[in-house]
Structure formats: C-alpha cells, structure tokens
Amino acid sequence: MTMNQTITVFPLTPDRRSDFEVLFGPKGACAGCWCTYFRLGHKVWQDAKADERKAVMLERIVRGPPPGLIAYRAGKPVGWLQIGPRADIPEWNNAKRATTPLADAPADDATVWAMSCFFFAKNERGKGLSHRMVAEGVEFARKNGARLIEACPMDEANKAKSIALFVGSTRVFAKAGFREVARRKPGRPLMRLEL
C-alpha cells in the first residue's frame, strides 16, 4: 500500500500467510488466540486449542478476501489489524457485547466494516503504529466499498504497551475522526467513521 518511516502495509493475502505466522509466533499471540476471538462462538473459542484456532485463521486467509492488514518494518512483519465487513467476525455482532450493531448499521450489510483487533510485535508497541494501521485500514475499507467503519476500543489501559489494547485505544480512533455512537460498557465506546 504505502511506505512511511520504513513501515510498509499490505492486505493479508495468502502469499503473506507465513509472515502472519511469524508475527504471531509459536504461541499464536494473545494466549493462542490467532485473532479468532471474534470469529468463533465463545464456547467454541474457549474449548479450541491454539493449533485449532490457528488452522481456522490460516484457512480464512487462504479463502480470502484479505481479513486484515499486515505491517512490515524493513521487511519484517511487525503489526496486524483485523478489518473487514462485520459479517466476517460474527461474534463481534453478539447482542451481549459492547460491539453489538446498531439498527442503521446491521451486521449483514457488506458496506458496514469493523476494525476489531490489533497485534504488534513487542518491540513495536507504544511507538504509534496503531495510528498508522488505523489510517491504512480506513483507506483499505474505502477502496473496498465500505460506507462506514466501526471500532470498539478501550478508553484506558494500564500502560501504552498493554496487550489488553488488542481492541485499540479510544484516543487513536478519535484522532482518526471516529466518533462515539454508543456506550454499552464502561470504558468501551462503539465508535464510527463514515466514509
């Protein structure tokens, strides 16, 4: 896509699958999640082993379209943003979550997208890469027919490098022009950017 300060960002296509595996490491990031937390039902996710979650995500990458963006610094994978139509991450649409869709942006509308998860290599956290990934995600969504993008970040974390920020920071999304449209859980606004 673009280059800035040696960072390059590309859609996660099948030819980049091994880079995704390198970034997530042998344990699959976030306690073996492999970015399937919003893809699998809660009980299924809990019962699945890390290698089963990995298989789900790798199959999704191969099937396409790209389920997100992968960032590189000097050719090495360093960052991930899961972005795409809400329908692609069914658990994000669960009525019991802070991310539940609003009536004007239903989950089955292919033009309603979500930025649901981030993951950065440990030495990249706290360096502003999330700002870059959000900007790239907005452009990716716009080019692929989205009319709006939603996110459900957290207002605060214990520290800027916290793994708990896998949903992103409210501050980062606000700076990118997202506005709060609902708040069903303290500290977790549902935010939206209309394209």
Image: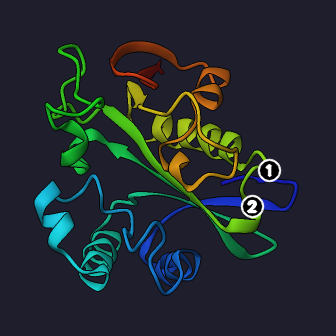
Q: How is the image coloured?
A: rainbow
What residue would you read off at disc 2?
A: 124
Disc number for residue 12: none
Position of the N terminus by quadrant:
bottom right
- Residue 92, horizontal then vertical, whole percent: 25, 42
- Residue 79, horizontal then vertical, whole percent: 62, 62
Q: Is residue 75 left or right of residue 156?
A: right
Q: Residue 190 occupies which quadrant of the picture?
A: top left
Residue at screen point 58% across, 28% down: 173
Q: Residue 58 occupies which quadrant of the picture?
A: bottom left
Residue at screen point 17% across, 15% down: 103
Mark 1 element type? loop
Residue at screen point 29% across, 29% down: 98
- Residue 156, horizontal then vertical, whole percent: 58, 32
In this rendering, is residue 117 above or below 18? above
Residue positioned most to the right: 5
What residue would you read off at disc 1?
A: 127
Which kind of residue does numbered mark 2 sit on? Glu
Q: Is residue 117 left or right of residue 112?
A: right
Report if the CB atoms under discs 2 and 1 are less than 8 Å apart: yes
Task: Say which of 157 and 114 sits in front.
Answer: 157
In this rendering, is residue 94 above or below 179? below
Q: CA distance from mark 2 to mark 1?
A: 6 Å
In this rendering, is residue 191 above or below 124? above
- Residue 162, horizontal then vertical, whole percent: 61, 51
Local crowd size for mark 1, using a 10 Å CA cut-off: few (<14), some (14–19), many (≥20): few
Which kind of residue does numbered mark 1 sit on? Lys
Mark 2 element type? helix
